[in-house]
Amino acid sequence: MHMNTLPNDFILGAALSAWQSEGWSGKKEFQDSYLDLWYKNNKHVWHNGYGPAVATDFKNRYKEDISYMKEIGLTHFRTSINWSRFLMDYENAVVDEDYAAYIDDMINELLDNGVEPMICLEHYEIPAVLFEEYGGWSSKHVVELFIKYAEKVFERYGDRVKHWFTFNEPIVVQTRVYLDAIRYPFEQNTNKWMQWNYNKALATAKVVQLFKEKRLKEKNGAKIGVILNPEVTYARSTAEHDQEAARIYDLFFNRVFLDPSINGEYPEELYELMKKHDIMFESTEEERKIIKENTVDYVGLNLYFPHRVKARTSAWNEAIPFHPERYFEKFDLPGKKMNPYRGWEIYPQIMYDMAMRMKDDYGNIEWFIAENGMGVENEQRFKNNDGMIEDDYRIEFISNHLSWLLQAIEEGANCKGYMLWAFTDNVSPMNAFKNRYGLVEVNLEDNRNRALKKSAYWYKNVIETKTFEANDEGIYK
């Protein structure tokens, strides 16, 4: 074991989203989000039928939950404002005063308890009506409606919130729906996938532009960014064909957001591939100028597991619509360490490798880990005689990832913090409550009552002492 010491100003917090925690209490019938729409139309694919309807009931229990945040000592808490609920009228950005008052109270409660709020404007909560009427983020009109929504949010909470984000994981919904067609409404359309990617990058730039106009940085030192989920990609081998597969994967799934958000432009090679395969997004010179001139202040990165690819071993069927998989296949590394419940590889070195990339390829922009965590099934197996879940596996997971992150910071990476996914157990898409991620247990059998897990007490100690032990698996200290 090795003792690690974190920087004094290092953020140690936790995250949740609105739709994964709030529940539908007080929601008007017309205020469905995309996730609510999916759940209502496709409920049977959600584990045990659980979905966003009750979730963790955070909307009614936020004071109780924030008291746990205070007890653990979280420096920051990241959540989202549910766009579909914040407004009564999406075209004219008429605010729902009931929901807005709840957000007000929740933000004030956090601040009163010494927890800094980090607020994301969209965590898959695009209003269902905009999804159905305009095709969601396919539409430039929806981009404009998002700016109107952002303006109302900044007006309400810009005096108190210092950490703002446009999107969480902006690539995810369209990849599941339009590229891979594995989620409602199951439409394979690679062109639409690419247009969603572009329109969200444009929306981020336009919100950054609005943020500057509102002078929120000058007024209270606020910053605006985006939360991305780059998949740290490793080639099967050093051979050129495998390296090429990894590079093209990276272009389509990582650089498609990293580059416009941070550098203000897309890689030339991505343009060439989009033209070659007839999936070029529609854009104007004026829009591209807005993207160029309105890059983010910082980024949050969600990192859970590595992504491994190899060159294709079978010919691509040119008769079917283009998919980036024309250039690669997923590679299953023999002997890898696994989280068997989630089916994800455990490879803490992703923290270091991504950190070095941010330093070397993206101007050492300020960033932080916005999500990292471990989902485990049937955690009640690990309850001790006092009824506390002894989640030593989570403690090991966090400490090993933090250890690699610290190694990168010592080598000059501009990483400012770590946010655990998640504060409490919560609803995930489809998996619902199957895998538990929380520092705090949510007991579904007992009125969703809360209880701290062993990891919560461990995290509290890390926050207080800024030190932790790790077994340094693979670390070369």
Image: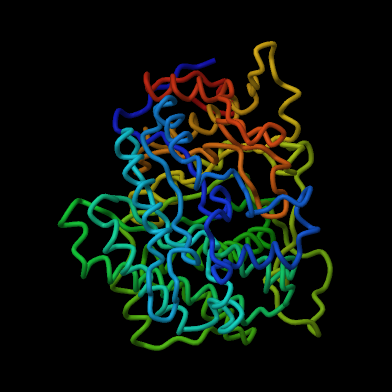
Q: Tell me: residue 318, above or below residue 297.
A: below
Question: Looking at the image, which residue sits at the far left?
Answer: 218
Left or right: 405 as drawn, with respect to 339: left
Q: Tell me: residue 466, above or below residue 151.
A: above
Q: Tell me: residue 283, above or below residue 98.
A: below
Left or right: 107 as drawn, with respect to 177: left
The quadrant the N terminus occupies is: top right
Where residue 184 appears, as percent x and y from the top left, is 72, 69
Residue name at image x 51 percent, y 83 percent: 139
Residue name at image x 41 percent, y 45 percent: 368
Disc tally is 0
Residue 158, picture quadrant: bottom left
Left or right: 345 as drawn, with respect to 257: right
Residue name at image x 58 percent, y 72 percent: 128
The one of 436 and 303 positioned closer to us in this rendering: 436
The one of 114 and 314 positioned closer to us in this rendering: 114
Question: Looking at the image, which residue sits at the far top?
Answer: 385
Rendered image coloring scheme:
rainbow
Left or right: 111 as drawn, with respect to 444: left
Residue 334, picture quadrant: top right
The one of 275 and 218 positioned closer to us in this rendering: 218
Residue 129, picture quadrant: bottom right
Where residue 108 appears, as percent x and y from the top left, is 31, 44
Where residue 8 appears, as percent x and y from the top left, is 30, 28
Where residue 16 appears, as percent x and y from the top left, is 51, 46
Q: Tell me: residue 362, above or below residue 284.
A: above
Residue name at image x 65 percent, y 22 percent: 389
